[in-house]
Amino acid sequence: MEKIAQLRCVACATAYPRDTEHLTCPRCGLGGVLDIEYDYEHIRERGFGPEKLKNSPHRSLWRYLDLLPLPDDVALPSLEVGFTPIYPAPRLAERLGVSRLLIKDDTRQPTASFKDRASSVAVLKARSLGVSEIACASTGNAASSLAGWSAHLGLKAYIFVPASAPEAKVVQLRIFQSKVLLVEGSYDEAWDLCQTAAGVFGWYNRNAAVNPAMVEGKKTCGLEIAEQLGEKIPDWVSVSVGDGCTIAGIWKGLCEMKRFGFIPRLPRLLATQAKGANPIERAFLAGKEDIEPQPAQTLADSISVGHPRNSRKALKALRESAGKVVSVSDEEILGAIHELASTTGVFGEPAGVAGIAGIRRAREEGIIKEGESVLHVVTGNGLKDIQSAVRAANVPVHRVKGLSDVEAVVRGS
Ligand SMILES: *Cc1c(COP(=O)(O)O)cnc(C)c1O
Ligand SMILES: [Zn+2]
């Protein structure tokens, strides 16, 4: 794969050849996440650029195959993924006090979360390596996503989730026929167990923080934002943060598209964490490279991460983009579910909307200035966590029997 130059450890900067078998840096262990470095000159010579994309046959993330760690002749899956729409949200913008707000809707991915971007790349990667068994640990969405993509391609998936994962996400795992391992413990414990088991049983490891190909899948969101908006790229891009792979991936995608001339300037990143799970915010504010793990406590299960596995990449992206981190309470997150849904028609899960509460906070704290524009990525579908949505939907329903009851409701409104 000539488009890849080498892989580099984010901790010690050692470079490894493109065909390295290591997933993480052997010197640094799991802290040594590898980053795939491309030969952009080569990719340019192959013709990648605005003109080529305009003529792409794919209305999916496969339009960016030039920038993904997969062979050119890879057999692509037919399940649609990526190239999700971006909507203006003027009524919500007004409520949040920002001049222009855009919503990128990743709730409509095939398994209803952003994670399909990484899983779709993972299963193709596994298949191209001739592997038929794949594993991951997840708070829920990476799991249900990998389960769906494994079902699509006929791979066997071993999935480790905390026993507390929302029911809808566990149902997805079962309906897609994966091997579900419910771990009595936190996501952080599920992650450790999966890591060990993958080593023992020789499964292909989809854990986003240790598998460098995963961030490449996630970066397609940044590639899309740049291609779809071009010169209208907003001042800020907002996303909620757990392990940190999503924000790091989006940043990498945006940087690549700037390099290829799709956007004139780079936006700043706004990261939102839950107050009860904010190790990346703490490290960022303290100016530190390393996070201090903490017990995680938030109803936003997808970002309930006390020991983020990709904090280095996330912190680097935040610093490079002159970004900011804010944290919000569970109450604010519940409010944001309702606020986003009722003003845009997009129904997000708690982690998908935490950044909406984050935008309000950033505006109040003067981080987002008067007149600045923001795009928020809604990373997961609200139907994945009905329990939280029920708590958020504090709107009365009316029990009616006949027309007179209906009339009473109409007059009352
Ligand atoms: C995984 C996830 C995130 C956070 O991504 P990280 O890479 O863990 O930072 C945000 N929202 C949803 C819905 C997710 O599933
Ligand atoms: Zn290293």
Image (tube, rainbow, N blue to C red):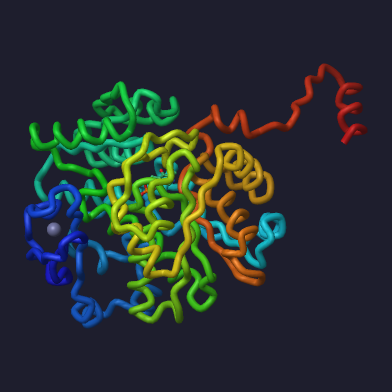
The C terminus lies in which quarter of the figure? Answer: top right
Of residues 104 and 193, the one drawn nearer to the viewer in this rendering: 193
Give the x, y percent position of residue 148: 32, 38
Of residues 334 and 261, the one drawn nearer to the viewer in this rendering: 334
Q: Is residue 163 left or right of residue 274?
A: left
Q: Residue at x 54, y 27 (%)?
A: 387
The N terminus lies in which quarter of the figure? Answer: bottom left
Tell me the quarter of the picture where residue 388 sits.
Answer: top right
Give the x, y percent position of residue 239: 47, 54
Give the x, y percent position of residue 210: 21, 48
Q: Is residue 131 left or right of residue 117?
A: left
Tell me the quarter of the picture where residue 259 sits.
Answer: bottom left
Give the x, y percent position of residue 137: 27, 36
Q: Is residue 27 above or below residue 58?
A: above
Q: Residue at x 17, y 71 (%)?
A: 3
Q: Residue at x 21, y 55 (%)?
A: 212
Q: Residue at x 58, y 51 (%)?
A: 356
Q: Is residue 359 left or right of residue 69?
A: right
Can the viewer see residue 55? no
Q: Is residue 396 above or below residue 254?
A: above
Tell me the quarter of the picture where residue 83 sits.
Answer: bottom left
